[in-house]
Image: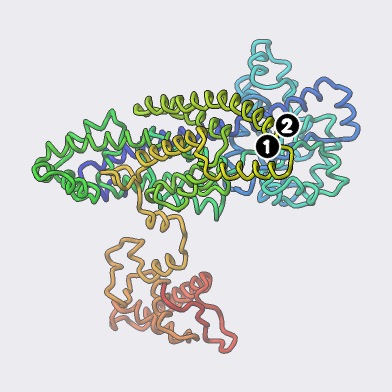
Amino acid sequence: NDFRERNNDSGDAELRFVTCQSLWNKIKSETEQIQEDLNKQLFDNLGSFLRRSHSEFQEKTTKWTCRMKSREIPTAALVLGVNVTDHDLTFRSLSEVLQNNITPYIALLEAKDCPGIKNLMQKLMGQLMNCYIDVESLEDEDYVQVSQNRIRCSMTSLINWYKSVTKKTDSETPSKKRTSSSRHLQSPPVVVIFKDMESFSTKVLQDFVVISSQHIRELPLVLIFGIATSPMIIHSLLPHSVSSLLCIELFQSLSSKEHLSTIIDKLLLTAQFPFKLGEKVLQVLINIFLYHDFSVQNFIKGFQLCIVEHFYSQPLSVLCCQLVDLKKRVNSLSHDQCENIRRLPSFRRYVESQVSEKQIALLTADSFLKETIQKLLEDLHVYHENYVPVLRCLHVFTSSLPKYPLGKQIRELHCACLENRVWETKEYESCLQLARMLNKSDLVTMLQQCVEIFVSSSGKEFDKTVEKLKEFLTQFQKLEVAEAFQERDVSVSSQKELQKKTDLYHLQKTLLELKESRRSKKLTKFEMLRFEVVDYIDSLVRNYLVPADHKTLHEIVYFNTASVLRGHLNAAPRTALHTALNNPYCYLKNQALKSDGGSISNKAPDICIAYKLHLECGRLINLVDWLEAFSTVVMAVEGPNADAASSDQVDDIIHARFIRAVSELELLGFIKPSKQKTDHVARLTWGGC
């Protein structure tokens, strides 16, 4: 609603809103698919672990019998990393996968809900009772009857419930049984997931493990421990006598850094989505990720915020769309929108570079301007198509160099290319010098990778590039054959030469001649070819990796307002609190709360009046004086014509309002009781925000 209200004058607010929503839905769908692909291997391994545990229980093998004698519980230690905010999504996805393929009996437990073993059992049974194999396959009256019964929360009750449910499943008709077993295992295990194991009480974990181990023969229980730090936390929380009751298998999820690299690679380094992030904005999101929480979900939320803010604040973002819709939207531009385009800094530079006749046409004729806009935006799309494969090719070279002058990750190289002309930096010069010293095998491998990148790219200008790189590879192969013969001939001739001159004088003379010839020798064919390859890659970089802010109309598709994003994501609670209390109109948008300068409006909330009055006081505030000032402001509109009876009642109400306002300021940390004087409070905050 705020999006529409702010842009209701532009006439295209609805279209921008729909475009923003459509773009985000596509990005969200792509993100979910990426996360599903990244977690697939981990979930498959966990599924195999559960199937093994189940099959051993069902078949009563010797291995399972031995385990039962020792009362070991199959346990998966799932190490997810310190990005705790991402764990909830991972466990939800894991729960869905297991429920669809392995077992319907899954309980997700959190430490905050399980302060004691009794609470844990209540939470466990409460979740499992709603996890029937197929609600449709059970009779309605049985389901209701079970849900209405009060069942005692104990392991015995859980075992009886499990036996009754699996017995009903076994007694179903063959057709229903086939449907159920096609999705779930026969006699499926009961999976208990501890989402945040480090936060659980040691006593609660110990009691649950000991009790469960005593009933493991009757209940196929499997534990999954969600671990943020290290698997050693299991042995820190549980003594040996308890941890020995667990048969632990370790599972490691993909690191959050690798996850982020994949997200950036699929969402930002692609021409699939027209919206792009500027260098400073991307750096803000990456810095928050690296130095605050390592949360991929928060990075995606920040990316979503950038999309909304761009379409919200940029009137020309209506042109941030796919090429198929571009012509229609350009032709529908109004005169005011054309004027907005003429005011863009990048378009001004473009106009200044044209001849005078074209300048006049661009600044006066809207029809000619629209034709130019369409061509420029199509060129910008082609720029993105060509930018990505060349960036990947450059990353192939820079990531294999020692000390990584331009960074190891492609996101670092991408930021460097967005910031300025990367070929003018010292780091790039260092990369070229190191690349000119690469050996033949490394160079050939890199060229082969670059060929694969350009062949699979959507850019239409790289056919000649692929041919040139393949030509380099062919020359290296020919060179390798020629050098093999040359080395053999040289070694034979030099051996004969040394055999002729056996005395020390002639031997020293020969060695000096060899040393002198090496100093003055020309570059070998391999060295010349290596220089040629590096120079060609350098030419690609200079042609295709021009910074985005050098391209005309980049403001339409790039979000560059890092300060706005920083204001949204980097919280400044003291500043926000001061603004809310000192100027409540900023948040409440009530016209009655507008005040001039330092005046105090009696229409403001009580806490705002008390806060403004306390700013005028020193270190110690007299409560009586404060109350009188508060009463004066509040009673400013009452007038002196009230009778005595009602006046006493009003004083009591004002007194109560004042006490509540002071208590709220104390809760927020602005004041505290003073030990020096009982009728005074001490002020705790000083200076402006």
The residue identified by callout 1 is 107
Q: Which residue is mark 2?
A: 190
Residue 647 lies left or right of residue 662; in this view the side is left
| 407 relative to 96, above or below | below
The residue nearer to you, when weighing 69 against 477, is 477
Whole-percent x and y of residue 184? 67, 22
Residue 160: percent from left, percent from top = 78, 30
Between the C-alphas of marks 1 and 2, the distance is 8 Å
Residue 144 seen in this snapshot: no
Q: Which dot marks residue 392?
A: none
User: Badges 1 and 2: C-beta atoms under 8 Å apart?
Assistant: yes
- Residue 235 seen by the camera: yes
Where residue 459 sits, quadrant-wise, is top left
> What amino acid type is highlighted by mark number 1?
Ala
Amino acid under disc 2: Val
Vertical arrangement, residue 648 with respect to residue 474, above or below:
below
Q: Secondary structure at mark 2?
A: strand
Left or right of residue 78, residue 537 in this image: left
Instruction: Using the image, determine if residue 557 lies above or below residue 614.
Output: above
Q: Mark 1 vs mark 2: which is more N-terminal?
A: 1
Question: At 43% across and 37% down in the image, what residue appears?
Answer: 537
Q: Residue furthest top?
A: 174
Q: Determine the secondary structure under disc 1.
A: strand
Farthest-out residue, bottom: 677
**How many numbered discs sit on the rendered protein?**
2
Image position, residue 239 (x, y; %) = 85, 49
What residue is drawn where x is 70% and y is 33%?
A: 500
